Amino acid sequence: MSDLPRIKTAEPIIPGVLKLVFLDGYEGVVDLRPLLSKGGVFSSLQDPAHFSRIKVDEFGHSVGWLGDDGYEVDLSADGLRRDCERQAEIHKLMVV
């Protein structure tokens, strides 16, 4: 069994898009705009100022944002890694 991915750093590139660096050295970009456009708990992240306040959790297992109401929205490291890798593959297919 392999170790679960852990995030070292998370940086917004543009509103809704993150550059992630994982502890194993993998770097990827993930476009969260389709998820954010669904609204609901993600509505506050449509605000670029709020999206830029991203935090990596203490152990690197997730990234999250704390809302003004104290509610935290978080996304898991393993899901983000999977999405980074999938989006990188799609990008390769489109560039060829």
Image (tube, rainbow, N blue to C red):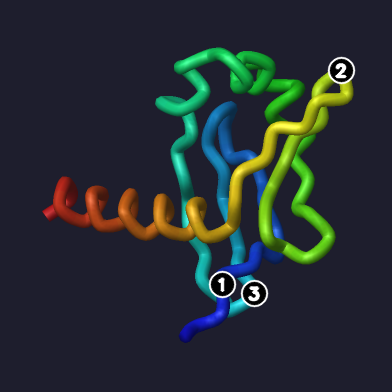
Q: Name the residue under label 1.
A: 4
| Amino acid identity at mark 2 | Asp
Residue positioned 58% across, 57% down in the render? 77
| Amino acid identity at mark 1 | Leu
Q: Name the residue under label 3.
A: 23
Query: Are the two marked residues, 3 and 1, in contact with CB atoms closer than 8 angstroms?
Result: no
- Sequence order check, earlier mark of 3 and 1: 1
Residue 58, x across and y down, in percent: 83, 60
Residue positioned 53% across, 14% down in the render? 39
Q: Name the residue under label 2.
A: 68
Q: Is residue 2 left or right of residue 72?
A: left
Residue 53 falls in image quadrant: top right
Q: Disc number at residue 74?
A: none
Tag 3, which secondary structure? Answer: loop
Crowding around mark 2 (Cα neighbors within 10 Å: few <14, some 14 to 19, many 20+) is: few
Q: Distance between the residues labelled 3 and 2?
A: 30 Å
| Amino acid identity at mark 3 | Leu
